[in-house]
Amino acid sequence: MELRNYVKDLIGEYSLIPENSVVVLGLSGGPDSVCLFYLLNSLKGELGFELVCAHVNHGLRGEESDSDEGYVRELCKENGVPLEVVVLGAGELEDKKGLTVEEAARIVRYDFFEDVCAKYGRVAVIAVAHNSDDNAETVMMRILRGTGVDGLSGIPLRRVSERGTDIVRPLLRTDRTSIEQYLSNLGITAKIDSTNLEKDYGRNKIRLAVLPMLDREFSYQPGTAKKQLGRLSANAATDKDYFDVLTDGLIAEHFTLDNRLPRFARNDGDRDCTNEASLCVKVKVDFLVSLHPAVRHRLIVKAFSLVGLKQDIEAVHIRAIERLLEDSGTGKSVNLPHGFGFAISYDDAVFLVPEGGLRVGARNDSTDGARGGGDFEVSLYEIASLCDGESVEYLGFSFSMVGTQGRPPRRPLADTPPKKGNKDGNTEGDLLLDFDLLKAKADFLLIRSRRDGDRIAPTGMSGTKKIQDLFVDLKVDRHERDTILLLATPTEVLWVPEKRKSRSFAPTQETTSLLAVSLV
C-alpha cells in the first residue's frame, strides 16, 4: 500500500489526530521527520487539521546545527507551513544535572513542543517521527538493561504527556527503508545528522553494530533482527494492554481514597505522618496478598502512578513492599522516592501521598504506555453497557445511565433534576450529560487533577474560565488546588465537584440517553 494511504488509515484506525486540531510536528530536518512533514502536509486538508512545525537548534553540532535550522525554515516557507524555532544557548543542556546530553536534549525538545501547543490554543497533538527501526532499537536497548515484559512493548503509538497532550507517532509501523524510498520518489534530500553515524552513543551501537551482527551471525537477511524484535514488541504490547485493563478494573473495584491518615513508623523513627501526607489510597492487605505477583507488582506501580509517582519506582522498592506485605505488621512502612510511602495500617495497605495532596494526572513525568499516563481513564464504551439505573464507581465518582440498553427512561430526560443544588446548577448534585453528544466527541472521560491552561465553560455564564482563576475567585486554598479531582474529556473540564459544572453536553428535550455523575 502506498505510504500516504497507509499512514492515513493508521491515523483513522487509532484516532491519532482529532478533526479541527492543531498538529505540532517535531521537525529536525532528518529523513524521518521530513517524510512525516510531507505526509501530514498532504493529509491536513483531507483529515481537517492544521499543521505547525517546531524545530529545536540544540547548538551541539555548530554549523551543522545551523544548517539544519536553515533547511527547516526553507522547507516550511516553501510549503506555507507555520514554523516555531528555539535556539539553545551554550551550556543550556549541561545545566540539567545527572542527565546525559541526549536525555537533556529530549526534555528540552518536548517542553518546547508543549509550549508551541499552548501558543496555538485549540486541541493540539504533538507528532514525532519515530519509526519501526527506532522501536526495534529501543527494545534491544531495554533487553540489555534487563527490562520486564512491559518494557518489551517498546515505543507506544500514542502517549499522553505530563501536561496532558497526546504525543503520536504515525510512522511507528513504517521501516526506515520505506521512508527513504518515499523521499526518493519525491526527489527530496533530507539532512543527515552526522552524530547518527558515530558509534559513541548507545543507540547508535545497537543500530550500527549489534543488529547487523545478529543478522550476520544467525544467517538472517539484512533487517531480519529488527523485524523479529518488532514481533516481540507487538506480542509484549498485547500482554501489557491486558494487564493494564486488568489493573484498572482492580483499582476501580478495590481501591479507595481516604484523608484520615494512619500513624506509621518511618525508617527514621516513629512520628505522626499527618504532617507529611495529605491524602492516601487504601486497599485491603488480604486482597493484595491474594494476587499473583505479576498482577500485584503491576498494581502497586499503577496505584502509585495514579497518585503522581510515575517514575523512579525500582525493583528494590517493590521487594521492600513485598517484605512488608509478608510481615503485615501494622504501623510499618516503606519510604519511596519524592516523599511517597507505603504503609500497613491494620487490615489496610496504604499508598501515602506527600504534602500537597493527591496528584492524579498532575504535572509529573509521564511514562510511555497507557494513553492516560497518570490520569484515571473511564471508558464510555463500558459506561454505555450499563442498564437504566445501574451505576459504577471510580475514585469517588459514581456514573449511572438513564435511557440505555433499549429500556425507556423512568422520566423525560430533560426533566431529570440534580439531587440538590443552587439555582444555576453549578455546585452540588449530579452532573448531567447528554451521553450521545458526549460519545460523538470522546471515547473516554478522565478523572484527574488540574493542569496548566485548564478551562471550563461554566453553566450560567458565556465563554470559558480558567480553572486557576475559578479557584482564586472561590478562595480555594493554594495547597488544596492540586488535591481536587476534576472530571474531564481529553480536551475540556466538565466538572469541578461542588464548585462548577460545564454547560458542555447539557441535556435537552431531544436527549435520549443521559449520563449522571455524582460524588460517592
Image (cartoon, rainbow, N blue to C red):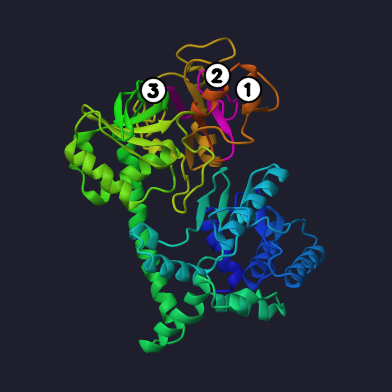
Q: Can you give x and y, in whole percent of width and height, for residue 170 in the image?
A: 56, 62
Kind of residue at badge 1: Leu
Nearest the eye: 492 or 281: 281
Relative depth, front residue between 199 and 143: 199
Q: Residue at x 46, y 42 (%)?
A: 374
Distance CA(mark 2)–CA(mark 3): 26 Å
> Which residue matches tag 1?
470
- Type of the residue with mark 3: Thr
Highlighted range, magenta: 491-520
Q: Amino acid at mark 2?
A: Lys
Residue 349 shown left or right of residue 124 in the figure: left
**Mark 1 crowdedness (10 Å alpha carbons): few <14, some 14-19, many ≥20:** some
- Quadrant location of the N terminus? bottom right
Instruction: Where is residue 400? Give x, y as percent.
Output: 39, 27
The answer for how far apart the CA atoms under marks 2 and 1 are is 9 Å
Q: Main secondary structure of the magenta part?
A: loop
Q: Nearer the viewer, residue 435 or 203?
A: 203
Mark 3 residue crowding within 10 angstroms, few (<14) / some (14–19) / many (20+): some
Q: Which residue is mark 2?
A: 499
Q: CA distance from mark 3 to mark 1?
A: 28 Å
Q: Is residue 426 left or right of residue 156?
A: right
The reply to whether callout 2 and callout 3 are in contact (CB within 8 Å) is no
Which residue does the numbered mark 3 point to in the structure image?
Answer: 274
Are the residues flagged by discs 2 and 1 in contact, CB closer than 8 Å? yes
